[in-house]
Amino acid sequence: MIAKIKELMYQPDLIRNIGICAHIDHGKTTLTDNLLAGAGMISEELAGDQRFMDFDEQEQARGITIDAANVSMIHQYDDDEYLINLIDTPGHVDFGGDVTRAMRAVDGAVVVVCAVEGIMPQTETVFRQALKENVKPVLFINKVDRLINELKLEPDELQKRFINIYMEANKLIKNMAPEDKKEEWSLDIADGSVAFGSAYHNWAINVPMMQQTGVNFKDIIDYCNDDKQKELAHKVPLSDVLLGMVVEHLPSPKVAQVYRVPNIWEGDIESPAGQCMINTEADGPLAVMVTNVSIDKHAGEVATGRVYGGTLKQGTEIYMVGAHKKSRVQQVGVYFGPERVSTDSVTAGNIVYVTGAKGATAGETICSPEDKIQEFEGLEHISEPVVTVAVEAKNTKDLPKLIDVLRQVGKEDPTVKVEINEETGEHLISGMGELHLEVIAYRINDKGVDIQTSEPIVVYRETVAGGSPQVEGKSPNKHNRFYITVEPLEDSLFQALQEGDLKEGRVKGKEAAADFMEYGLDKEEARRVWDIHNRSMFINMTRGIQYLDEVKELLLEGFESALEDGPLANEIAMGLKFKLHDAKLHEDAVHRGPAQVLPAIRKAIYAAIMSAQPALLEPMQKVFISTPQDYMGACTREIQNRRGQIVDMRQDTGDMATIESKVPVAEMFGFAGDIRSAAEGRCLWSTEMSGFERLPNEMQNNIVKEIRQRKGLSPEPYGPDHYLG
């Protein structure tokens, strides 16, 4: 098997890199187990119960996937053998970052949907994550046996249910796929890009399999009713149908890199490196995108990535573009589930593991020191950390070790934000939700540091509700003055930045102006944007000011650092539009250095915010509850008691109803226990992030006070005059 993997690695036409993704509990890991059993890697009896890919003990204990896990296997299809590199991804919203990272490494995705629940919020999110990365989806409708045995659906009701799921999936693809792929990627039951089955009972069917075996829907209903699903699994084995669908409908690296590389790499496609990636060539400049980093007790840092161009060889020197440093590769190879198999080299089109790339983080670009290339585009995570806990070591002697471990954790999971404050000794970890933080805390303990964590704290954001008058920021020597105003950023621009349609960063040249105008920025302002940071803009509206260009970098540095801790409650500020209207600068460069310009611009920014109705934004979550109708009243009361708004209520099949609502994250602690008792354990619920919204005015003062006291600041924020003195 391993010899075969090593042989097929060099034939990109016979490789498929795929991700398995779905809403939580729709059956991804069970499905992956059965695919591995079909490839002869684990016993068929254990498949589904073994959870081979959940090799972390937390995953085994909680019965959910937390980390994306990789495995390579061989599948015989028609007369050829194919190498399938598969990543099993998590479904829980707290671990969505893993899905984003996995999508950068694969070319195709098998989206699993539970036939009983249908397309759920997290299913939409994984479709969005896949299509944004130009990854082609196919659909597997799982748990069909439950429709037959539990819900007792007739054949025509079954078909209606399938068609609804399939139509809804196609609607998502039409809305989110790249323009030129909308038609080509739409799913079609007739061509076999949609399969139905039961991962637990190890059978599946699609139209080509029906034609080949003569098994039809009526037979499937009979097999399920007669309790003969084992026989059915021998006639239509899940792995044959699924891996056949993967080989037939998902692209090889050779096909996919042609359209994926221009989407994720901004370098010159005509250059040798660009051509090498487009053609998936093994001889050519090396280009590897790191998608994940884990820490192994024995091997140290293990980076996982996708080789887009060239060949990564054991023992060679590499260059990390983002970290600006060289390193030497110790081992390279492919994954075999929990084990790693080392090979001498791994070529373009494969998913690779590397040891020895010290200091690499997810999103890093690896190339050879002789052939430096432009880096790949950063990974954009769909949600952001909104819950924080303070972590301290139980024994003071563990402090240095705790700092190391926190840095490791931040490296292993880029969606975790780790703040280490050496002065106060307070270490903060921010994550996607309670479960995310529990798992991180468990892992820190697991790495040999005993810690205690505070109660979870919600992360707020600062913004303004009105416009400010022109304020003057003076430098400490009074020789430099900046005149600025602030107002809320237009909604359309804010949305575009939120969804990644507009990129953040310093603006070079005027070519971005057209994009800004498209999202509603005034023409004059659009041509003068200098910087975008934290979904806020800095626009230079001055004309002909001497020496301004020389202090431009300092101004932007001051602008960016001021937004990291706003004046209201020291939280990140966002959604702001600053305009520089005028400036007076000292003619001698000595008197306009960093020590003068940085405090002047920061103070002006703080004074402007404090004189423009400063406001707090709180993180919101969409909460979806599926419950029997008798418990609807109890569930809606539970939401309303938590300042939630009901967005939609609809009747599903049978006596089930779905409630869609929006609730502040601050009110969601303890929700799991309360909703269980409200519906006597008979409801299913899930959440997803829904951005930030204005905190109600009557609550703002108290919350600002609480945050400031917690951070050791004066209880009341300073007024604008404090910054202008």
Image: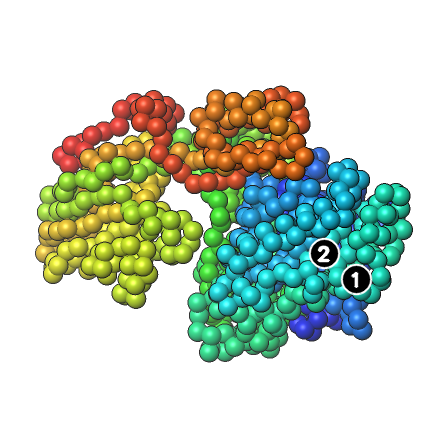
Label 2: few (<14), some (14–19) or many (≥20) C-alpha neighbours in 10 Å: many
Image coordinates of residue 724 in percent, x first then y, are 15, 36
**Which residue is found at the position 75% from the left and 38% from the top?**
151
Looking at the rendered structure, the secondary structure element under dot 1 is helix
Q: Decide: is 194 above or below 221.
A: below
Q: Position of residue 702 (x, y in %)?
A: 34, 22
Give the residue at mark 1.
209
Separation of disc 1 and disc 2 at Cα?
Answer: 9 Å
Q: Quadrant of residue 478?
A: top left
Query: Residue 143: x percent and y percent?
Result: 74, 45
Q: Amino acid at mark 1?
A: Met
Q: Residue at x 29, y 54 (%)?
A: 520
- Do residues under tags 1 and 2 come within 8 Å of each other at their CB atoms? yes
Residue at x 66%, y 72% (from the top left corner): 12
Q: Quadrant of the N terminus?
A: bottom right
Residue 275, placed above or below residue 698? below
Q: Is residue 76 above or below residue 364?
A: below
Residue type (three-letter) at the residue carrying disc 2 = Ala
Decide which of 7, 237 is in the foreground and name it.
237
Can you tell which mark lies on residue 288? none
Residue at mark 2: 195
Which mark sits nearer the N-terminus, 1 or 2?
Answer: 2
Observer able to see residue 51: no
Q: Secondary structure at mark 2?
A: strand
Taking the image as shown, residue 273 lies to the left or right of residue 559, namely right
Q: Is residue 628 visible?
A: yes
Q: Is 615 left, or right, of 664 in this rendering? A: left
Quadrant where the C terminus lies?
Answer: top left
Image check: 304 left or right of 546?
right
Expressed as whole percent of the image width and height from the top left, the position of residue 357 reads 57, 58
Q: Residues within 10 Å of mark 1 (few under 14, many from 20)?
A: many
Task: Please name the residue shown 63% across and 67% down the image.
Answer: 251
